[in-house]
Amino acid sequence: MTWIRNPQVSAMLLLGAAILGLVIANTGLGPGLDALKHMHLPFTVFGLDLSAAHWVTDGLLVVFFFVVAIELRYEFTQGDLSSVSKAAVPTIAALGGVAVPALIYLNLAGADGARGWPIPTATDIAFALGVLALVAKRLPSRVRALLLALAVIDDLIGILFIAVFFTESLSLPLLGLAAVGVVAFWLLGRAYRGKRGSWPLRILLLLVAAVTWWLVAMSGIHATIAGVALGLVLSPAPAESAREKLEPFTNGIVLPVFAFTAASVMIPQVPLGELSPVFWAIVVALPLGKLIGITAAGLLGQWALRVPKGGRVLLRELLGISLLGGIGFTVALLMNELAHRTTPELITEGTLGVLAGSLIAAILGATYLALLNRRYPDVETAEIRARDAEEYLRRTDGVG
């Protein structure tokens, strides 16, 4: 299953599932699919009464956020964000990439859609890295490192937005019990020995995780926050084991199922000019807001922190990163559903806005980076030529 870990494959599965959902929703099968999404089980699950679509967003998607949190922990402890100096520029760039799209959205969406301002602030890690890997293999490693670090911080900001701005009612006792569950999960993780651990301990970890998820869901905070909290506190050995086992599942099932479900909306039969301001706000804010915000903040951060020339991301490279930053997708679709949960028509137009804005950013970013990629030498070819030259000099040494 190593092929499914490939970022290019993950991006293609995500895009394919979204297109399939959108197409089916606009055929004769659309009403049946919509009814299936809103179908409830004939019984509650420990007090939870969720539709099929909400079991995807509040249940299945928790696994994705758990894996994201494991990656967040790694990046902040051992990876590209493990020191203040490493994290400073990506953090400044990410903040610019959040602030400018939010401001553009608020200026275009109007009062009715103002609640959705966090939607265009998200960047989809899997999609952005997939496009980069597909069209820009020759670019320096610093480009991928900055995009990865920026997207990780962007995800962290998105998680905070979900926790703070999309919590309508809060049960402090249940939240307190959920915190106890997180502590218990942390303690069990510390008892984990070796890469495999013992089966009883692994089963106990699963049980504690399930109870914690239920407590968070019942407390009023979005259930995905449980996955984030558990992933952040899990010790390195079990965390790495969990990531290895869950990554194919998230790439091959969780994200495509969510993309299919979220994108399966009926396109309104109205002229473009009659679409709501929410649609246009997202379409403009995602590609343009990220382009302006990330580029300007990235340049400012490198200048303010006096990053040496050899370690700087050049303007032409930063423009490519900024364009890919406009691919919102997964987290943006989730925040769209949370922001407009009481207005289904805005969920539809917001979803179309996220898909359209992300597609524009992906096309512009892929085209630009493919052209930019040509300006850099083929590393593999250069290495082969260097080895051939070295071998030639060795063989002709002393001949003369």
Image: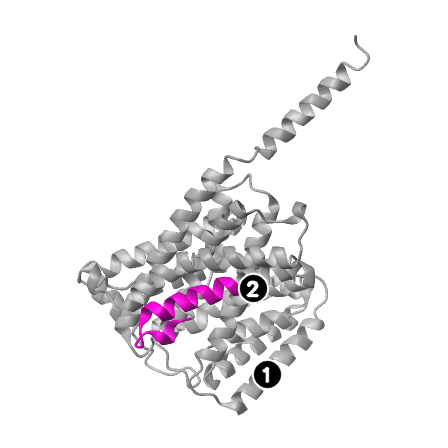
> Which of these two is toward me, 279 or 187?
279
Q: Is residue 357 left or right of residue 206?
A: left
Look at label 1 and name its amino acid: Ala
Q: Which mark is residue 116?
A: none
Most frequent secondary structure within the magenta stretch? helix
Q: Is residue 177 visible?
A: yes
Q: Label 1 belongs to which residue? A: 179
Q: Is residue 218 left or right of residue 280?
A: right
Frontmost of labels 2 and 1 is 2
Relative vertical location of residue 302 with respect to residue 205 in this rendering, above or below? above
Closer to the chain start, of discs 2 and 1, is 2
**Magenta segment, which residues?**
95-117
Q: Which mark is residue 153?
A: 2
**Which residue is painted at 40% across and 71% down in the image?**
117
Look at label 2 and name its amino acid: Ile
> Which of these two is toward me, 391 or 146?
146
